[in-house]
Amino acid sequence: MDATKAADAPAIGWGVIGASTIAREYMVDAIRRTGGEPLWLMSRDDTHRAGFAHELGIPQHSAELAGMLADERVKAVYVSSINSLHRPQVIKAAQAGKHILCDKPLATRAADALKMVKACDKAGVVLAVNHHFRSSPVHQTMRRMIAAGDIGEVRSLIIIHAGLLRPVLQTWRIKDPDEGAIYLDLSVHDIDLASFLLQQQPRTAIGIGDALALGDASAHDHTMYALRMSGGAFVQVNESFVTPDVESQVMAYGSEGILIASGTLAQRSTGTLVRRLRGRNEAIPLRANDIYADTVEQFLAAIEGRGEPRATGRDGLASLAGAEAVARAVKTRKSVEIKVPE
């Protein structure tokens, strides 16, 4: 959003649900950068909530949703709570007429995510999912080049998304198997990215995974899997919370050439893009952006009736169904068909 326009437009009131690390480090700032005003914070932890609200300058905070949802100044909410709380919080916000930007995964089960999508449809509110990799200029350029046939027909996509999970994040996401561990943290992102880049949907999944160093034995921190996409492309993904010094890679292998994106699976607009054709490498020029601000900006445009969010509720539903299938394939050691509930 243009800074002048943001300054001239009336501030949009926001409620923040969940005092998360991503909210503190990125999203509250992104809301303000796009003309929003965070008015409320809801979090169940009294001490943490008060300190968070004070640090980020959010004037009102509560352990309950009622006050936030009753405030007519609040037009949109950002849901950044633990995964298992997304469903009830999104449905309550929709019933209160608030537009919703929800962190991934949309829920812990695809069946619940479908209920959330339907609740937002019924209430006539926008539901967006914070799949911020769609906002990367590298990934947007890759998508355009793939669609234009710049490397021919894409036959394979390889995603390497690994590193050491920061200690501050080694809590519920990896300690509680019900929160989905690596599958509902990284796999939902990478499956969504594959669908976005290829404009195809995952149809079957096979995989292996394990808990190598963090958390419960059934909360995996390391996995590899493969997908067959609706258009025939193969996708291979390597994800890890326990491998240091890995630079992320997203590689599209086409019938005529290759696209190689390096260092793009981050929380800032980073990375490079190279096209390799006929034995020569060509660096693709790109301009960095604020990927979270872009995500919020597109959400606000959708509220105004100008297109769709970067990732809709149904996009989030599809990525969750894919991640569920991957987890099931790992557990059963069998190929699993991916079915998106309707």
Image (tube, rainbow, N blue to C red):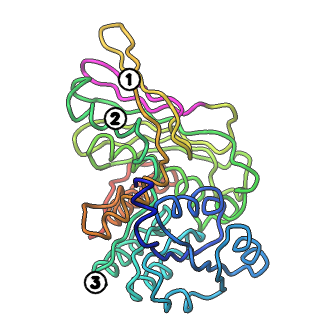
Q: Position of residue 226 (x, y in %)?
A: 41, 40
Q: Quadrant of the N terminus?
A: bottom left
* Label number found at residue 122: 3
* Label number found at residue 92: none
Q: Amino acid at mark 2?
A: Thr
- Residue denoted by label 1: 284
Does the magenta portion include 261?
A: yes
Q: Earlier in the sequence, mark 2 or mark 3?
A: 3
- Residue denoted by label 2: 141
**Label 3's element?**
helix
Q: Quadrant of the C terminus?
A: bottom left
Q: Earlier in the sequence, mark 2 or mark 1?
A: 2
209 to the left or right of 303: right
Q: Could you give the CA–CA distance between mark 2 and mark 1, rounded to whole angstroms?
A: 9 Å
Find out whether the residues at labels 1 and 3 contact each other: C-beta distance under 8 Å: no
Q: Could you give the CA–CA distance between mark 1 and mark 3, rounded to whole angstroms?
A: 43 Å
On the image, which quarter does residue 100 sit in?
A: bottom left
Vertical position of residue 76 compared to residue 128: above or below: below
Residue for point 47% across, 69% down: 107
Q: Amino acid at mark 1?
A: Ile
Of 317 and 236, the residue lying toward us:
317
Task: State which region is magenta.
Answer: 247-263
Q: Main secondary structure of the magenta part?
A: strand
**Label 1's element?**
loop
Find out whether the residues at labels 2 and 1 contact each other: C-beta distance under 8 Å: yes
Residue for point 66% across, 66% down: 176
166 to the left or right of 286: right
**Label 2's element?**
helix
